[in-house]
């Protein structure tokens, strides 16, 4: 982040900037920092709203239960990784392609942009609503394709263990691709034109221009957007919670979804906090490692 | 030139500024290479929306795939019978309150970041960036505890607070980028003319921040309108449900009423899709202004 020196030449009494950031800082202390701290505290407690008589200090009991006695923890973690990797890579590829397309000049570009970006504004629950309609055997695409004789009646992708993953991935892609397209388009627009002109003069093919001019310029934006998106998809609960409910047979349960159902349904806050703490640790470790390994911010 | 080239209200001189966005004539490609993939992608984007609209407006029992004749019976069921009228009002209240709170707090903090250097500035900035990695879903339990202490459970204010806090960091950083783009000389001229710092800000800077304010405000509104998990966790009285919670309950019925589901979906989609259609230009421009580059 570039530090703006412009405004700092005036000497003011030093109180003003602190007063200005105070509301933001206090809100974040009270509603982000303190809660994160309290999660760590609760993770060391037995704390179940449904069984208050068992409450008390637990030491590492919750973590032992998580690591050694709870196959659902490992299963949900495995699915989370699969979900994040598949979603982020597909969204990146499609989003980059889309950004390159709508960065060109063509008739109707403004309308095309507004339309292809629009699913970004739609909530996870609404995405579920729409795709439930599309996937349902009596209301969905498959029924009308079957009417035309193109396929069998009765396909129910969400109820079939073989197809539920692909079905959920597709629904989330519909909503997720515009995120990358918007971010990458913003960055594409800041590439100086002379770079391309110079490359053209040098006789570089379009592919070479893409590889040697566009990609290096987009590098930091790609690293940052994939990281943000990975964190976001890791935490994406709304869609899976409503679309599959984590099923069938916990097949599509991510770690946060598992936390949410532990919190909302079984009200076991102590164990839920231990799962949350594990989630924090995994995310922090992943983010730091990702930024390090990808050499974010390094000059190319 | 189509509308896609942003015309920023200010063009402060400076060596570090990137060139304004401009389509690249040097890399012009064949028309079909644009239109064919674009058409395919549009199909993928629009068929789901179309499906929802058709199911929402067609009369009960119809199996037509054309949205004609239009019937409003699904909307009547949803709006009055299922309570979406109330949910809509709740969502609107929470969305607008989050918008105002986020924008005001982010403006103050963003101004401090853009115009002052002070001890702790970097720490504050890093802390803001770190919060981007705090998962909302993981905050359900601790935030619930906080709101229970503050007696805000089952109050729409809990949603406003939670939304605002999660929106703040990005909004603040975005707005400070926009404020930095307003030349400080303009403000100084106002001070020389006898304006106070606050008046100078209101008269000189604020009008120039319009694209940034539009982007940040609508971002806050859309995210708040769409939030499901906080609303599900913190509010359990039916007259305080927001639209996503209402929609989820429609989905969870034993035998889903697909007409009602689709109509509820249209009710949920119209405000945000409209807002988004208006602001998406500003959004690209706002991000382009350098805020995402860290």
Image (tube, grey):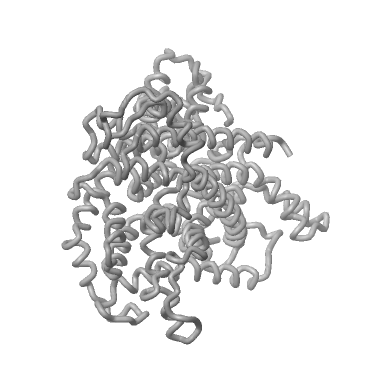
Picture coordinates of residue B73, whole percent (x, y): 20, 72
Q: Nearer the viewer, residue A18 or B143?
A: B143
Q: Nearer the viewer, residue B88 or B61?
A: B61
Q: In this view, does B278 lie to the left or right of B253?
A: right
Residue at x 43%, y 27% (from the top left corner): A40
Quarter of the rendering containing residue B72: bottom left
Residue A207 visible to an observer of this rendering: yes
Q: Nearer the viewer, residue A88 or A207?
A: A88
Quarter of the rendering containing residue A124: bottom left
Q: Is residue B182 above or below residue B51?
A: above
Q: Residue furthest right?
A: A202
Q: In this view, does A108 lie to the left or right of A96?
A: left
Picture coordinates of residue B53, whole percent (x, y): 34, 70
Q: Residue furthest front?
A: A69
Picture coordinates of residue B103, whole percent (x, y): 36, 37
Residue at x 29%, y 65% (from the top left corner): B261
Quarter of the rendering containing residue B74: bottom left
Q: In this view, does A157 lie above or below A225?
A: below
Q: Which residue lies furthest to the top in this view?
A: A13
Q: Which of A87 and A157 is in front in this view?
A: A157
Residue B9 visible to an observer of this rendering: no
Residue at x 57%, y 42% (from the top left corner): A227
């Amino acid at each position: 982040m570039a530090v703006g020196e412009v405004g700092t030449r005036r000497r003011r009494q030093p109180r003003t900037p602190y007063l200005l950031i105070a509301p933001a800082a206090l809100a974040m202390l009270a509603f982000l920092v303190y809660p994160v701290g309290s999660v760590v505290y609760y993770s060391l407690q037995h704390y179940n709203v449904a069984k208050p008589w068992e409450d008390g200090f637990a030491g590492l009991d919750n973590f032992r239960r998580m690591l050694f006695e709870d196959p659902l923890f490992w299963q949900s973690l495995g699915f989370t990784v699969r979900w994040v990797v598949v979603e982020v890579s597909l969204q990146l590829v499609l989003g980059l392609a889309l950004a390159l397309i709508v960065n060109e000049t063509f008739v109707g570009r403004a309308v095309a942009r507004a339309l292809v970006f629009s699913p970004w504004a739609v909530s996870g629950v609404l995405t579920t609503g729409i795709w439930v309609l599309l996937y349902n055997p009596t209301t969905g695409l498959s029924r009308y394709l079957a009417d035309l004789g193109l396929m069998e009646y009765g396909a129910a992708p969400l109820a079939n263990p073989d197809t539920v993953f692909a079905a959920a991935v597709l629904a989330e892609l519909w909503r997720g691709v515009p995120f990358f397209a918007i971010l990458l388009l913003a960055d594409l627009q800041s590439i100086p034109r002379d770079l391309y002109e110079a490359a053209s003069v040098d006789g570089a093919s379009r592919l070479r221009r893409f590889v040697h001019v566009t990609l290096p310029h987009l590098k930091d934006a790609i690293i940052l957007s994939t990281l943000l998106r990975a964190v976001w998809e890791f935490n994406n609960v709304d869609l899976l919670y409503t679309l599959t409910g984590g099923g069938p047979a916990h097949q599509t349960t991510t770690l946060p979804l598992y936390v949410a159902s532990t919190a909302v349904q079984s009200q076991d806050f102590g164990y839920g906090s231990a799962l949350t703490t594990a989630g924090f640790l995994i995310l922090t470790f992943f983010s730091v490692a990702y930024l390090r390994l990808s050499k974010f911010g390094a000059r190319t | 030139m189509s509308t896609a080239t942003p015309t920023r209200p200010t063009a402060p001189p400076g060596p570090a500024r990137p060139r304004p966005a401009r389509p690249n004539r040097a890399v012009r490609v064949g028309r079909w290479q644009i239109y064919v993939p674009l058409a395919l992608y549009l199909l993928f984007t629009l068929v789901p929306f179309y499906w929802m609209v058709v199911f929402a407006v067609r009369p009960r029992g119809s199996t037509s795939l054309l949205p004609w004749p239009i019937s409003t019976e699904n909307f009547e069921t949803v709006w009055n019978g299922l309570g979406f009228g109330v949910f809509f009002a709740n969502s609107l209240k929470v969305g607008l309150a989050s918008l105002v709170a986020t924008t005001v707090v982010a403006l103050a903090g963003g101004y401090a970041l853009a115009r002052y250097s002070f001890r702790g500035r970097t720490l504050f900035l890093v802390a803001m960036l770190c919060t981007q990695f705090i998962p909302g879903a993981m905050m359900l339990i601790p935030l619930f505890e906080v709101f229970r202490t503050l007696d805000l459970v089952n109050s729409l204010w809990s949603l406003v607070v939670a939304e605002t806090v999660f929106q703040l960091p990005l909004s603040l950083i975005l707005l400070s980028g926009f404020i930095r783009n307003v030349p400080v000389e303009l403000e100084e001229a106002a001070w020389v003319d006898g304006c106070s710092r606050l008046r100078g800000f209101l008269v000189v800077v604020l009008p120039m921040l319009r694209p940034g304010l539009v982007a940040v405000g609508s971002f806050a509104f859309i995210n708040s309108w769409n939030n499901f998990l906080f609303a599900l966790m913190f509010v359990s009285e039916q007259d305080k449900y927001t639209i996503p919670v209402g929609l989820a309950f429609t989905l969870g019925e034993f035998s889903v009423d697909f007409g009602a589901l689709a109509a509820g979906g249209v009710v949920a989609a119209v405000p945000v899709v409209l807002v988004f259609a208006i602001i998406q230009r500003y959004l690209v421009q706002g991000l382009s202004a350098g805020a995402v580059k860290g």
